[in-house]
Image (spheres, rainbow, N blue to C red):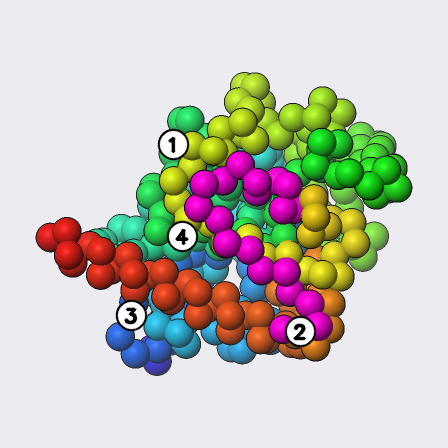
Amino acid sequence: MSEREVFRVSTDDGVALALERIPARGKALGAAFLAHAMMANRRTLDRPRGAGLASRLAAAGVETYVADLRGHGDSGPFREWSYDEIVRRDLPAIARFVRARHPGVPLAGLGHSLAGHGLIAALADPQGALPPLDLAVNIAGNAWLRGLERSWTKWLEKRAAMTLSLAIARAVGRIPARALRYGSEDVSRTFIEEIARWTREGRFSLSDGTDLLAAMPRVETPVLAVFGAGDRLLCVPEAGARFHAGLRRLETIVAGRALCGFDPGHMELVTDPRSAPLWEEIARRVARRLEEAARARATAS
């Protein structure tokens, strides 16, 4: 396998994003890009390095690219960023770059948490900035809406967490995740105010009012939704399933003891070595879908 490379990808508003390539092992079946959670960076998606989720994809024959979103990791330093920018600028720029490097082959996108629901949002967005994908994988990504969370106690927990987050962000100007030991990357006040609006209004939407949940039934891309059986708050499997319910082409995995030997929590889905059987299953399904898409292209031509 050839060496890893790190590229700089420019968004249409001039932000340089870091994108690390992990070459496919053997003949490439297609390409995929991955992006991370809110308080994290791309390194969480290949932990331990060389044996994490991203490396499992490459070992399955997928040209793999792992991205830092704006204000995170090597796409820093910290800056104010919004959900609109993730959905309409960062993810499309990453996808276009990978598509340009691998023209004509099937393409998948994978996201954890923030990037997971951001990927679904980009697919549902009527502005359609994201290039066509052959598969989208959303790992533990959903919106905190009352209509999706049927448990009153869980909803009270979510409202309390959102209220506290908003108060901290307004007082400090950001969520100082690193100082609070919540994660490696601080969180923009703008984004916290956006997701607080979702919780308050009960709508998963962009700043221009685009109702993303209502638009999801128009998404034609196959989606694989992955939940952790031990995720008690951030993406409770039942609420996550309701978030995805409007999609037309959906498969789900609830990772628990039967697959992993334990019940993974929100971050453990991508960072705990015990989740390796899940990473292998995701890689297997991505590779299978890319092979199917390649055969369909060959038949059509």
97 vs 268, left or right, is left
Mark 4: amino acid: Leu
Q: Tag 4 or tag 2, which sits nearer the N-term? A: 4
The boundaries of the magenta stretch are 240-259
Question: Residue 128 bears which disc, if any?
Answer: 1
Mark 2: amino acid: Ala
Q: Is residue 247 visible in this depiction of the protein? A: yes
The correct choice, above or below, for 37 with respect to 26 in the image is above
Residue at which label 2 appears: 258
Task: Choose mark 2 or mark 4, whichever is in front.
Answer: 2
Residue at which label 4 appears: 135
Crowd rating for badge 1 (residues with CA inside 10 Å; few <14, some 14–19, many 20+)? some
Q: Is residue 94 visible in this depiction of the protein? A: no
Mark 3: amino acid: Ala
Task: Choose mark 2 or mark 3, whichever is in front.
Answer: 2
Q: Tag 1 or tag 3, which sits nearer the N-term? A: 3
